[in-house]
Image (tube, grey):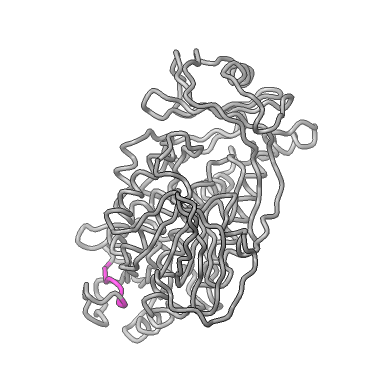
Amino acid sequence: MNGTVTGTGKNAGPTHPVIVVGSGPTGLLLAGDLAAADVPVLLLERRPHKISNLSRAFGVHARTLEQLDARGLADDLLATGSTITRLRLFRRLSLDLSTLPSRFPFLLITPQYEVERLLERRARDLGVEFLFENEVVGLRQDDNGVDLDVRGPDGTVVTRRAAYVVGADGHRSAVRQAVGQPFPGVSVIKSLLLADVRLAERPESVLTVNGAGDAFAMIASFGDGWYRVMGWNRRHEVPDDAPLDLEEVREVTRRALGTDYGMHDARWLSRFHSDERQAPEYRVGRVFLAGDAAHIHSPAGGQGMNTGLQDAANLSWKLAAVIKGQAPATFLDTYQTERHPVGKAVLRSSGGLVRLARAQNPALRAVRALVTAAVNAARPAQTKALAQISGIGFTYPAPRGAHRLTGTRVPDVELAGGRRLYEALRGGRFVLITPRSLEEPYESRDDREDLPAVEHWASDRRTTVLVRPDGYVAWASDNADTTAIERGLTSRFS
């Protein structure tokens, strides 16, 4: 693996505008978005073509569902699982998801493979080129593009050239290693147990979580008769490759939950350790990192897959705008400035939850009791915690003097004519929402991708808002006229 980034600037032009490495949820959403924007994209995956039913993630949060709604996929995904409106952490801390200001005020419990299935279908329908059993073994970049050395299923290494490369190839990312990015962090929990099983007795809830003494266990229903079990025994931490049988999973579950619900017929058993790690730079020249290649977190709060999908939603439209000549290449730096702080915040919050859950000494247990009491009793504390875990509370930096809404997420507001904002975002373009009384500064034309789609508020709201393709405010004004709107449009890629 070549870990040196070179810059000769003498190589031929790129064959592919973008190569995405990794066909997990992050890579699939990103590749599909690029193809939807008419940017040809090649997706490389080192594994054989198979959507595994053994994936770890199982929860889809409100912000991710909003992003999927903007791609016409949310309703299909909802049909694959069950929803919960109350999330319990520790024994007494309870978060009421039904209060979320979203079309999706809940947590969707559905396996990751259902997310992958929908995203792969979309990507294929849009023309993404897939190459499976193709492994990145080298990378070099210059001023004009990136060369990837790719080993195919027959062992032959072929060099493929792209204008940009995105590494969405997981926590052992070959792309990250090739550009020399470190992955600093620590192991948070050793020897977590995972199992997919059937149960003789159905738990009372779709998601059952509890800890008792030195044991912790969680059971989530996949809705098809199978259940995901995750457990941990503080007194039995062994290497990932240590043998694991169903009886050990049963024992941990009984200690944590008081019963194993008649657990039987495991189709999968595994151990893994949970790390907290983050790459310092999400962009290295023409190479980007997204999802687990850029950051990995503890499973607390179920934010890992969700954060990766939101990375992809942030990066895809920016790459498309640069490749089409609508934005300067420097605009791609905003991916680092916007998403790296989010990844850091998720590391901090999920790690904090794990440390409080594992608390053994009296001081930490007292802190946990105080946090639980504060969040349960104080609405502002509950709102902040919900916004963090669901993803709807993250904002992006705004220029000095910008409107207070700039950089914030826009909820799925109602538009004139009975449309919703996230329906309007399905075109992959900016959406300009204006008061109905404001004269349109130009004709909204479907054949002009450089112009936003123009919509009006269904209400009598006076604020004019320019919404980015990922659902965040690019520019806003409380008293806009056509001149101000033109200035806002001009500045959207600055």
Q: Height in image: 208 above or below 135?
A: above
- What residue is rendered at 31% in x and 84% in y? 482
Q: In this view, does 123 lie to the left or right of 134?
A: left
| Residue that extends furthest to the left in the rendered view of this protein | 417
State the image coordinates of residue 72 (x, y, percent, origin top left). 29, 52
Residue 145 in magenta?
A: no
Toward which corner of the image does residue 433 lie, by quadrant?
bottom left
Residue 234 percent coordinates (x, y): 72, 27
Q: Does the magenta stretch include residue 455?
A: yes
- Regarding residue 208, the answer to whether it shows in the image is no
Q: Residue at x 46, y 69 (%)?
A: 161
Please say whether residue 412 is visible from this viewpoint. Answer: yes
The one nearer the camera, 8 or 312, is 8
Q: In this view, does 186 lie to the left or right of 198?
A: right
- From the viewer's side, name the closer residue of 159 and 269: 159
Give the residue drawn at x 35%, y 43%: 117
Quarter in which the N terminus is drawn: bottom right
Question: In the image as oriented, which residue stretches furthest toward the bottom?
Answer: 483
Image position, residue 270 (x, y; %): 57, 30
- 99 shown above or below 249: below
Total numbered labels placed on residues in the image: 0
Which residues fall within the magenta stretch?
450-456
- In the rendering, at what x and y percent does residue 392 appear? 47, 53
